[in-house]
Image: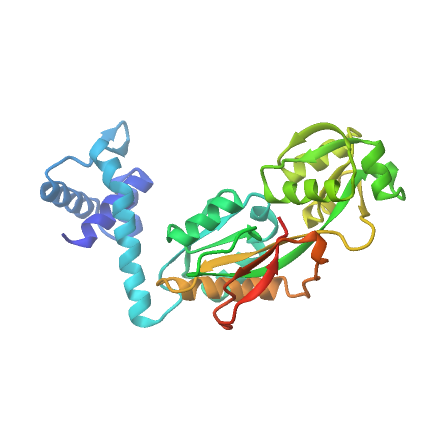
Amino acid sequence: MDVRYLQSFVTVVEVGSLAEAARRLDLTPAAIAARVHALEEELGVALIKRAGRSVKPTEAGVKILEPSRSVLRDIRDLRVVAGDGIALGELRLGVFASAMTSVLPPVLKRLYARYPDLNVFVATGSSVELCRQVSTGAIDAAIVVEPQFAVAKSCAWRSLVAEPLVVVAPAELAGHEAHELLRSEPFIRYDRSVLGGQLADRYLRDQSIRPRQRLEIDGLMAIAALVAQGLGVALLPDWIPLWQSGLAITRIPLPERPPVRHVGLIWGEYGPRASLARAFLAEAEAVFARPVPQQAPTQTIKQTIKPAASSRRKKQIADAG
């Protein structure tokens, strides 16, 4: 099977037009149509059909679309391995929700400035699910909240951003004591199904604070908007976009040493795109270069993971939820 046939088929489906696919691949529409027809002849099924002015995949075309993409990715990976290059190939990157607007954009800006031809596929999901996908090889790397479990031996983890928990309160409550607000004001709880919410819940229990919960919701910016409306206070990671939003909210630090949510990169160390993941890590560390504060032992769950490729020794890291 000629891989060019697969490339033409995938491009036609993605752009929805033989003419546009021809422009993308620098061919004539007749050549694109001939390639797709040859692939259909080889497989014995129709793969595309006309729908008005556009072209759509048939049921058989839908079935082979993702496997075809996978074959094309694998071939690009072979070129990377053979040439030990970085700019050729596709990095499959996972990103948890709040990192999509805070961590990802500045890192990609630096990455593309250095490797303008690099292709990046971005998938979203929960930190736990993204860690699982990295360990199975479904994606190459992921920006996640530090996992509460030991990551797979084939993976490495590096912390990039440390976000201590803070009380987020309406602006008019600036100057009040954090624990006083958590006990007296209506409480907007960060969803306990996500790691940051679990960290906040554990802190409240450790401090014997029983807040007057008003609602529980996921989404840091959504919670901040509710706080700005005077609906309560929240216990959240000190996420930079909160303070750049223009909302009428204030940051009130917790007493002594607060728990910290660490955001970082987990990646597969040995796959064909490991060099791409390390290139992403290098740019991320340049963006977020700053010391990572240590946590008190009573606020952590100890775990052992494999460190970055530059250091093979094992180390203990703390859970930051």
Residue occupying the point 67% across, 39% down: 221
Q: Is residue 44 above or below residue 156?
A: above
Residue 235 versus residue 119: which sits nearer the camera?
Answer: 235
Residue 150 visible at all: yes
Where residue 124 appears, x then y in whole percent? 49, 43
Residue occupying the point 71% across, 49% down: 238
Residue 12 versus residue 287: which sits nearer the camera?
Answer: 287
Q: Is residue 193 above or below residue 52?
A: below
Left or right: where does residue 201 sit relative to residue 256? left
Where residue 261 appears, x then y in whole percent? 65, 51
Residue 49 visible at all: no
Q: Is residue 290 above or below residue 189?
A: below
Residue occupying the point 47% across, 66% down: 279
Left or right: where does residue 242 sit relative to residue 56? right
Left or right: where does residue 161 sit relative to residue 153? right
Where residue 71 appears, x then y in whole percent? 25, 52
Q: Is residue 268 above or below residue 238?
A: below
Left or right: where does residue 94 sit relative to residue 255? left
Q: Residue furthest right?
A: 175
Residue 304 versus residue 177: which sits nearer the camera?
Answer: 304
Residue occupying the point 36% across, 62% down: 271
